[in-house]
Image (tube, rainbow, N blue to C red):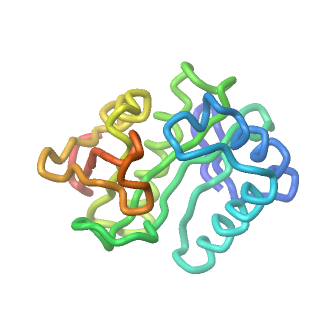
Amino acid sequence: MIETERLVLRRWQEKDREPFAALNADPEVMEHFPSTLTRERSDALADRIAAEFDVCGFGLWAVELSGEFVGFTGLSVPRFTAHFTPCVEIGWRLARSAWGHGYASEAARAALEYGFGVAGLKEIVSFTAVVNTRSRRVMERIGMTRDLDGDFDHPALAEDSPLRRHVLYRIGAGDPR
């Protein structure tokens, strides 16, 4: 468990599944993903996230605000091949009610500290669709720098998808945060 000034980042619990499914069914939250998720697909994602902790020793932590699940933030290993893989990625997904309060940046900074400190990582990346300005701002707020030569077409997205083109951000263990 990781505690910040306002948040708790923790392993997933059964009670997280319902609010996670609601978050994944929200078209605004999922605007920069190929589609919203059904409850079944959301539960399968929660299972994969939980299992990654056992494999990697880190993962996408459930984020709590005042005891309520509001999304996830943490570290994961991308399951696709690209010019920058293998790597460890930092990511987040928060309910709309948690937007605009600095929670994503606060939780991401804590995840970076864990990654560089406890996990001993040398570099962490993040990527998103070019049009996802909210996530790009979080990446910049936490000290990540865009790799101008790193933009790529996400291999899991169709060639005609407006979300296919992605930007790549990086941060090293010694970089200012």
Up/down of 72 relative to 94, above or below: below
Q: Residue 110, percent across and down?
A: 48, 46
Residue at 21 percent of width and 54 percent of height: 174
Q: Name the residue at the front extreme.
A: 160
Q: Quadrant of the N terminus?
A: bottom right
Q: Name the residue at the bottom extreme.
A: 55
Residue at 78 percent of width and 39 percent of height: 22
Please give left or right for residue 59 compared with residue 19 in the image: left
Q: Residue 41, percent across and down?
A: 73, 59
Q: Name the residue at the left extreme.
A: 149
Up/down of 110 relative to 104, above or below: below
Q: Image quadrant of residue 60? A: bottom right
Please give left or right for residue 146 compared with residue 37 in the image: left
Residue at 54 percent of width and 46 percent of height: 34
Q: Residue 169, percent across and down?
A: 27, 47
Residue at 76 percent of width and 50 percent of height: 38
Please give left or right for residue 50 compared with residue 122 in the image: right
Q: Image quadrant of residue 109? A: top left
Q: Name the residue at the top extreme.
A: 100
Up/down of 51 relative to 33, above or below: below
Q: Residue 133, percent across and down?
A: 38, 28
Q: Quadrant of the C terminus?
A: top left
